[in-house]
Image (cartoon, rainbow, N blue to C red):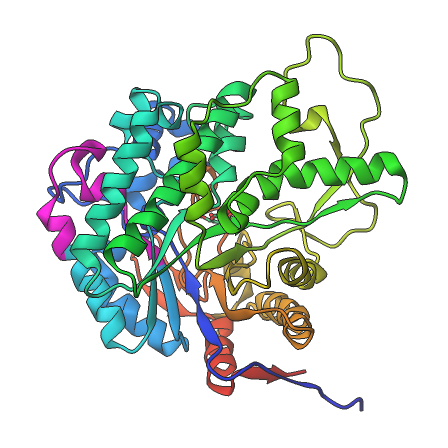
């Protein structure tokens, strides 16, 4: 029999999971929540959502948070991240503060902290108050300043309980899915708007960092990015160029200004060439320069594989990132068939090395990684879902993370997506990600095999295999 290896993590390494307000809280009559972009979209086109399950039916954390926080303990959490819903806290994004929401979030945050769990609170997880979307959303600079006010309000209202914050989750996703595709509102193809939305989001993030440091100098604040490395099909110059440009759009567009305080010159040149460079004032660029994040959250699910284009762009081809590269469907890749995402564990090691070598070895946490699986019911034995595939998925990634830490990566924790099966945007409840099963009919919660395994992982600060 081959000998087992022990993967022990550095002392104080954090173990836990992430969720978001819009994916977990749900809506209860009389709770004072106003409409978000997701609520409005579901009202308009429920058929776009898997099984027509919309955002009001998310995993009822609003009613069950006490029980859920106990479940965090039972699954070994030492860290937990959720988000405040802007549309719940501030009527239509700029109106009165909803006192019921204040009471709700204070109770939730206090209960988590009282359990000795490190709490990280995100201000924005794809959920814009719809009233702001109707006035142009992130294309309108008004949204930037409304967000800054919202961030300051959160620091004021909750800063006595919460000391670790996130400005945005995966800000490139609403840009790609809403302005270069139709998976988020407004669902248009408009590269100029995409560039403007990305710039305004970055400015808002930097303003939140500034506000946090001004009002609570002892607090720490980060941005969460999906730092998917871009891997070229081959060593050819064309494929290498494709990968470099893919990274400019997909990762460096937020990573560089957030961590280094400046945009990559090559990205600026490309946007200039296409005449879509957003107008930025010197004052705004100084805000971005002077207000970089204290640490990074990294979401990692899949690599980005690219190749050079097979044909030249036509005259009237609209500008999208694919103007410069094509996705590469690598033969023989390992895949999660339910989500259609490649599984490539080494990506997490490469992220760690990239941050070490090019971003001053900034401190980071894995803030999302996980495996969404459809039809988990068939894995039930004696009432418990035997999700060995999830345990293997986590362990395989942790082996690479461990290697990265040994090679000097400054990673301080691992957070799974997610602790309980939750609603996932257009996919609603199609793919289940949780350590805990959620019965949609009864709202009953049952720990899966992975939840018990995760507790041991946390208690032992590592695992053997
Ligand atoms: C991330 C989001 C999460 C979550 C996760 C899983 O990009 O930050 O909100 O949804 O992906 O993806 P999906 O729900 O699309 O399967």
Measuring from the top left, give residue 83's x and y in whole percent.
33, 52
Q: Residue at horizontal 50%, vertical 74%?
A: 449
The range drawn in magenta is: 82-103
Q: Is residue 53 left or right of residue 224?
A: left
- Compare residues 415 and 67 and report the one nearer the observer: 415
Measuring from the top left, give residue 279's x and y in whole percent.
47, 22
Q: In this view, does 76 lie to the left or right of 104?
A: right
Count of marks overlaid on the render: 0
**Can residue 202 be seen from the camera position used here?**
no
Q: In which quarter of the image is residue 353?
A: bottom right
**Can residue 391 be seen from the camera position used here?**
yes
Q: Residue at horizontal 55%, vertical 82%?
A: 10
Measuring from the top left, give residue 253's x and y in whole percent.
57, 39
Q: Residue at horizontal 28%, vertical 40%?
A: 148
385 is higher (above) or lower (below) than 188: below
Measuring from the top left, give residue 387's x and y in whole percent.
55, 67
- Compare residues 152 and 350 and report the one nearer the observer: 152
Check the image and name the residue furthest to the top. 316
393 is higher (above) or lower (below) than 42: below
């Amino acid at each position: 029999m081959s000998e087992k290896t022990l993967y022990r993590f550095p002392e104080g390494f954090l173990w836990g999971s992430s969720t978001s307000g819009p994916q977990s809280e749900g809506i209860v009559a009389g709770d004072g929540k106003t409409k978000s972009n997701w609520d409005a979209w579901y009202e308009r086109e429920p058929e776009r959502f898997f099984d027509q399950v919309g955002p009001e039916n998310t995993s009822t954390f609003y009613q069950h948070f006490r029980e859920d926080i106990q479940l965090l303990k039972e699954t070994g959490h030492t860290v937990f991240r959720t988000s405040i819903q802007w549309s719940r806290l501030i009527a239509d994004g700029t109106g009165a503060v909803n006192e019921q929401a204040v009471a709700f979030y204070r109770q939730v945050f206090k209960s988590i902290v009282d359990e000795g769990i490190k709490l990280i609170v995100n201000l924005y997880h794809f959920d814009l108050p719809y009233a702001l979307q109707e006035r142009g959303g992130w294309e309108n600079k008004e949204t930037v300043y409304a967000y800054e006010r919202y961030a300051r309000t959160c620091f004021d209202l909750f800063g006595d309980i919460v000391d670790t914050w996130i400005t945005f989750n995966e800000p490139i996703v609403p840009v790609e899915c809403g302005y270069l595709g139709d998976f988020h509102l407004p669902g248009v193809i408009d590269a100029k708007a995409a560039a403007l939305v990305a710039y305004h989001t970055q400015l808002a993030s930097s303003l939140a960092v500034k506000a946090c440091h001004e009002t609570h100098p002892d607090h720490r604040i980060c941005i969460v990015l999906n730092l998917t490395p871009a891997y070229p099909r081959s060593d050819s110059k064309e494929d290498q160029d494709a990968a470099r440009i893919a990274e400019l759009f997909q990762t460096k567009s937020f990573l560089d200004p957030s961590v280094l305080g400046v945009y990559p010159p090559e990205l600026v040149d490309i946007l200039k060439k296409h005449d879509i460079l957003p107008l930025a004032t010197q004052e705004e660029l100084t805000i971005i320069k002077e207000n970089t994040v204290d640490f990074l959250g990294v979401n990692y699910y899949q690599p980005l594989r690219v190749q050079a284009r097979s044909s030249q762009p036509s005259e009237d081809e609209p500008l999208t990132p694919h103007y410069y590269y094509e996705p590469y469907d690598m033969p023989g890749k390992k895949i999660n068939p339910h989500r259609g995402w490649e599984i490539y564990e080494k990506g997490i090691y490469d992220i760690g090395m990239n941050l070490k070598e090019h971003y001053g070895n900034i401190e980071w946490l894995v803030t999302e990684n996980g495996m969404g699986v459809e039809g988990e019911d068939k894995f039930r034995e004696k009432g418990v879902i035997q999700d060995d595939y999830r345990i293997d998925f986590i362990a395989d990634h942790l082996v690479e993370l461990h290697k990265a830490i040994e090679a000097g990566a400054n990673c301080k924790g691992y957070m799974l997506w997610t602790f309980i099966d939750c609603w996932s945007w257009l996919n609603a409840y199609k793919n289940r990600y949780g350590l805990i099963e959620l019965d949609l009919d009864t709202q009953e919660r049952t720990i899966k095999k992975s939840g018990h395994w995760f507790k041991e992982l946390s208690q032992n600060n590592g695992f053997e295999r």
